[in-house]
């Protein structure tokens, strides 16, 4: 009887540990430029799980769109999705009360609105201008503090992710991602954009 009780407790602990594992939001690669590394996958996934975002890299529901995840070291983590749903176009944005470089905290903003096809087309033009689908997933150029600018896309079943650390505001990648921030109409102080 004790043997079965021990096995039952052990199995319960194991199942509890499995369920406590965060979702994986990105495919991981081994030290290449096509994938994020294991540390990044864990960090970014924990932030997106706190934001209660869907996993899109292996989506089977027909997701078509892009997500920008903005993880500023000392400011609230933000995720913005732009999606094509049939003949409609939608913008979703969420923000947590923690910090992108630390614990994400709890959701304080969870909004969505229908957008015009011209907004989708304008964003698509920016995606094309940076040749998003051919960009390496990562280029390491860290500094002391800054922000991760992570852009994911899934179109026609093809997925790609690009992560850049604190791109300069004159950079086309910055302008592409920040376009989504502007579409949300969130009020963000200029000094908090990094």
Image: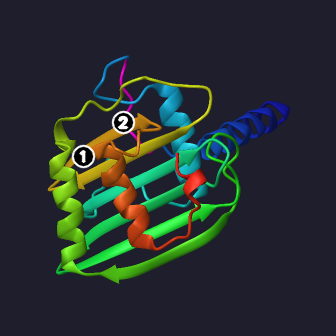
Q: Is residue 28 magenta?
A: yes
Instruction: Determine the CA span between mark 1 and mark 2.
Output: 10 Å
Near-viewer residue (106 or 57): 106
Q: Which residue position holds label 1?
A: 159
Secondary structure under the numbered disc 1 in the rendered image:
strand
Q: Give the vertical position of 54 relative to 34 (above or below).
A: below
**Boundaries of the magenta span:** 25-30
**Which class describes the residues within 10 Å of circle 1: few (<14), some (14-19), or many (20+)?**
some
Residue 56 showing in the rendered view: no
Q: Is residue 12 magenta?
A: no
**Residue contact between numbered discs 1 and 2, judged by CB atoms under 8 Å:** yes
* Colour scheme of the rendered structure: rainbow
Q: Give the vertical position of 93 relative to 114 (above or below).
A: above
Q: What secondary structure is the magenta-colored segment mainly?
A: loop
Q: Residue sitting at 26 percent across and 30 percent down?
A: 136
Near-viewer residue (193 or 108): 193
Q: Residue sitting at 85 percent across and 33 percent down?
A: 2
Q: Position of residue 6 (x, y in %)?
A: 80, 33
Q: Which residue position holds label 2?
A: 27
């Amino acid at each position: 009887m004790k043997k079965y009780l021990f096995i039952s407790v052990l199995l319960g602990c194991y199942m509890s540990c499995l369920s406590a594992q965060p979702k994986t939001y990105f495919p991981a690669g081994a030290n290449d430029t096509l994938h994020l590394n294991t540390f990044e996958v864990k960090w970014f996934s924990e932030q997106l799980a706190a934001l209660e975002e869907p996993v899109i890299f292996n989506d089977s529901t027909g997701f078509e769109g892009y997500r920008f995840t903005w993880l500023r070291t000392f400011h609230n983590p933000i995720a913005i999705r732009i999606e094509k749903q049939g003949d409609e176009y939608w913008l979703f944005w969420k923000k947590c009360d923690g910090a992108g470089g630390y614990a994400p905290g709890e959701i304080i903003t969870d909004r969505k609105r229908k957008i015009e096809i011209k907004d989708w087309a304008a964003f698509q033009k920016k995606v094309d201008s940076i040749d998003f689908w051919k960009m390496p997933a990562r280029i390491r150029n860290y500094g002391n503090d800054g922000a991760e600018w992570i852009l994911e896309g899934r179109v026609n079943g093809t997925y790609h992710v690009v992560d850049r650390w604190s791109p300069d505001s004159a950079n086309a990648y910055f302008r592409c991602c920040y376009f989504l921030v502007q579409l949300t109409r969130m009020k963000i102080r200029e000094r908090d954009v990094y």
